[in-house]
């Protein structure tokens, strides 16, 4: 016997086995939770608190009469006389059958998405397989639609923009970032509000979300007239990014590793002597005595305060690499261990991977601090503050923060927030939270080293989860390859990251694993990648170049500065350095838009042109903001490429001013020094140096 009831402005269905509760949760959005027994309110997730303003129960309007007024969008009406029972909320209508099957409809009464029972008798659309101690293996099924396209879901290396038909693991790995939010071409967005390890299967016969170990189902559903509106609703629900610091729109220089203070300063000085712009330079791994010390090794970095001061005088930020790993020989190991601030294990030793750390020539067992533990985050930040922030450093590279555990036996990990299989995907977001809350607290305390009112610090992370954007976290695409095929995949990876709520993103220019600066073929890859990087939200050079050196305290990798690739490459790359500088005011505007509206600077074509069916298919172009279309060159030896110009705008070549017809594909010139760029509707952007005036 099933029962419906109105609960706090929402709708609840129960039978003898399960419950489903549906609550208004933002403009045209609802939260759906389902489980066995009681509703659990304190499980970790991504959603912020529900906004106020829910109206009492009123008479339900019929389908087709829905308005999108501000009042309607924040209120709700529930009708339980059905069947079906209905919750009406702004432009969204949610129906629940007597069997507990949920269906979402738009303002016209047309189906956006519906749960799909696995069988006509049993089970229904939700499956709970008991694992003991109140945990279940959970499945949630939805219908599939032949014409549907699906985007978002974090960052992956499959090269797909539209991921319909793919199976996506919900797990954090180097280069694979799990953010369980999807945006559908049918006009909805769905957040699987669960940090458990699992998968989503986007099959032709149905969509299935899986959590290998969880306590209940929790998902959030939204709709809007445009994809941009869906992203705004998502940012409202999970948190808006702050405005990217102004310095961060410039050029970031890095190589595998600058070994010493003097080596790093020499590169920054060379940039200045050549008159080249530089915003950030990186002190990467092994600048520490040992993993978990979280400080400079004085043997190689004798006066970091002076180094920071010299860089600051040049207008250059120092970014330091901070790993969450802790070596048992670290000066912080004992305190972290005794206070229970490391990730625990259900069985075996309390270490999680092996790494050749600076003190040892052979792999050493290391552990990770527990970022889900507020006390552990406070310990980490206090150490970071003393050893970095008080020197004037407020830019932190959060490497290996998936965390990079090998072998990745999630169920053997014991976090403060729960078992690793249940909460493991949460880790990178909570790690970024430690730095954001530390920087913010320092800013609130007033002017001082490393902070100030409205601090301009940030973190740069190799992994993320839903809501990472609210903690000022940027993402890069991890340790990727160095060929044209990999470059092509980064465009889809970056666009889907942007469609997952993270506006700040980049890929290592030139890729990470290899690349010989003396090889003419690789020089071409580097030039084309540098062009792509100049129009990415973040513009960052990095990689382990030839001659590659073995992992150990002397590792450095080959040269990776713009002058490392020969005269022709230097000429082209420095031209794009200058172009990036001219575009920085425009980029600043896009970062402000990202913070306000949740609309990313790197945009899939359909974000601006949702009425153009072809715009939903293009995976090798993007818009930088609303006005600049970018078409990277993705093939060796290419001197032209095809470019699709969406219908609904007037397009001109940014290099020549020539007009091109919209809604068509054009073969465009692309000599080595030029990436195809098009301006929308007569936009005036300083692409050419002569335009500076």
Image (cartoon, rainbow, N blue to C red):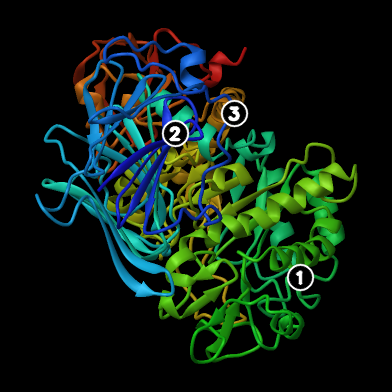
Asked if residue 427 lies left or right of residue 11, the reply is: right
Q: Quadrant of the C terminus?
A: top right
Residues at badges 2 and 1 in contact (C-beta under 8 Å)?
no
Q: Which of marks 2 and 1 is nearer the N terminus?
A: 2
Instruction: Quickly name the residue at label 1.
Output: 295
Residue 72: x and y, percent?
46, 16
Q: Is residue 216 visible?
A: yes
**Can residue 394 be seen at all in this image of the molecule?**
no
**Can you tell which of label 2 and label 1 is closer to the viewer?**
2
Q: Is residue 332 above or below residue 69?
A: below
Residue carrying label 2: 10
Which residue in the protein does label 3 denote? 52
Residue 235 screen position, x and y as percent: 51, 34
User: What residue lies at 40% left-to-right and 59% top-to-bottom?
Assistant: 37
Lower position in the chain sequence, tag 2 or tag 3: 2
Q: Which residue is drawn at 40% across and 78% down?
A: 409
- Residue 487 lies, with reference to residue 557, above or below; the image says above
Q: Which of the pair 15/265 is nearer the observer?
A: 15
């Amino acid at each position: 016997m099933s029962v419906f009831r109105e609960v706090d402005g929402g709708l609840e269905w129960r039978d003898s086995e399960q419950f489903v509760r549906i609550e208004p949760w933002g403009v045209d959005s609802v939260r759906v939770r389902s489980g066995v027994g009681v509703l659990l309110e304190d499980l970790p997730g991504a959603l912020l608190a529900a906004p106020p303003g829910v109206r009492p129960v009123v008479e339900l309007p019929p389908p087709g009469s829905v308005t999108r007024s501000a009042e309607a969008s924040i209120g709700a009406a529930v009708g339980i006389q059905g069947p079906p029972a209905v919750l009406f909320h702004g432009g969204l209508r949610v129906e629940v059958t007597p069997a507990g099957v949920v269906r979402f409809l738009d303002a016209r009464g047309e189906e956006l998405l519906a749960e799909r029972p696995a069988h006509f008798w049993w089970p229904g659309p939700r499956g709970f397989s008991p694992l003991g101690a109140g945990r279940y293996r959970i499945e949630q099924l939805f219908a599939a639609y032949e014409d549907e396209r699906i985007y978002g879901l974090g960052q992956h290396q499959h090269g797909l923009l539209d991921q319909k038909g793919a199976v996506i693991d919900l797990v954090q790995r180097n280069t694979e970032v799990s953010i369980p939010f999807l945006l559908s071409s049918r006009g909805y967005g769905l957040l699987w509000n669960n940090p458990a390890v699992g998968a989503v299967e986007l099959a032709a016969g149905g969509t299935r979300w899986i959590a290998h170990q969880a306590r209940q189902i929790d998902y959030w559903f939204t709709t809007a007239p445009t994809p941009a509106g869906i992203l705004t609703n998502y940012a409202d629900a999970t948190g808006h990014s702050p405005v990217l610091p102004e310095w961060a729109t410039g050029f970031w220089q890095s190589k595998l590793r600058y070994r010493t203070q003097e080596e790093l300063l020499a590169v920054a000085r060379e940039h200045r002597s050549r008159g080249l712009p530089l915003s950030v330079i990186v002190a990467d791994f092994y600048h520490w005595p040992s993993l978990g010390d979280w400080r400079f090794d004085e043997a190689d970095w004798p006066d970091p305060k002076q180094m920071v001061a010299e860089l600051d005088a040049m207008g250059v930020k120092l970014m330091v690499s901070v790993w969450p790993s802790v070596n048992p020989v670290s000066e912080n190991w004992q305190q972290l261990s005794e206070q229970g601030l490391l990730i625990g294990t259900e069985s075996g030793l309390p270490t999680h991977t092996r790494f050749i750390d600076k003190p040892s020539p052979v792999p050493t067992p290391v552990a990770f601090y527990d970022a889900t533990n507020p006390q552990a985050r406070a310990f980490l930040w206090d150490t970071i503050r003393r050893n970095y922030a008080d020197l004037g450093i407020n830019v932190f590279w959060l490497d290996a923060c998936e965390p990079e555990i090998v072998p990745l036996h999630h169920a053997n990990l014991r976090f403060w927030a729960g078992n690793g299989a249940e909460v493991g995907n949460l880790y990178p977001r909570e790690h970024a939270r430690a730095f954001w809350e530390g920087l913010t607290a320092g800013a609130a305390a007033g002017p001082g080293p490393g902070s100030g009112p409205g601090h301009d610090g940030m973190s740069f992370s190799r992994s993320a989860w839903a809501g990472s954007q609210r903690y000022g976290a940027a993402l890069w695409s991890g340790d990727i390859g160095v060929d044209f095929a990999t470059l092509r995949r980064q465009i889809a990876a970056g666009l889907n990251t942007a469609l997952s709520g993270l506006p700040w993103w980049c890929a290592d220019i030139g890729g990470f694993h290899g690349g010989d600066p003396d090889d003419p073929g690789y020089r071409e890859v580097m030039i084309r990648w540098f062009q792509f990087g100049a129009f990415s939200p973040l513009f960052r050079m990095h990689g382990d170049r030839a001659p590659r050196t073995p992992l150990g305290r002397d590792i450095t990798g080959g040269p990776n500065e713009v002058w490392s690739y020969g005269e022709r490459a230097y000429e082209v790359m420095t031209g794009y350095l200058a172009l990036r500088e001219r575009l920085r005011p425009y980029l600043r505007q896009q970062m402000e838009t990202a913070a306000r509206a949740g609309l990313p600077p790197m945009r899939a074509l359909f974000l601006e042109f949702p009425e153009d069916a072809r715009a939903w298919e293009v995976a090798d172009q993007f818009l930088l903001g609303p006005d600049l279309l970018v078409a990277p060159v993705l093939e060796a030896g290419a001197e032209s490429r095809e470019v699709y110009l969406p219908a609904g705008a007037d397009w001109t070549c940014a290099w020549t001013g020539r007009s091109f017809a919209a809604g068509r594909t054009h073969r465009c010139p692309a000599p080595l020094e030029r990436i195809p760029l098009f301006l929308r509707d007569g936009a005036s952007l300083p692409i050419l140096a002569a335009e500076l005036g």
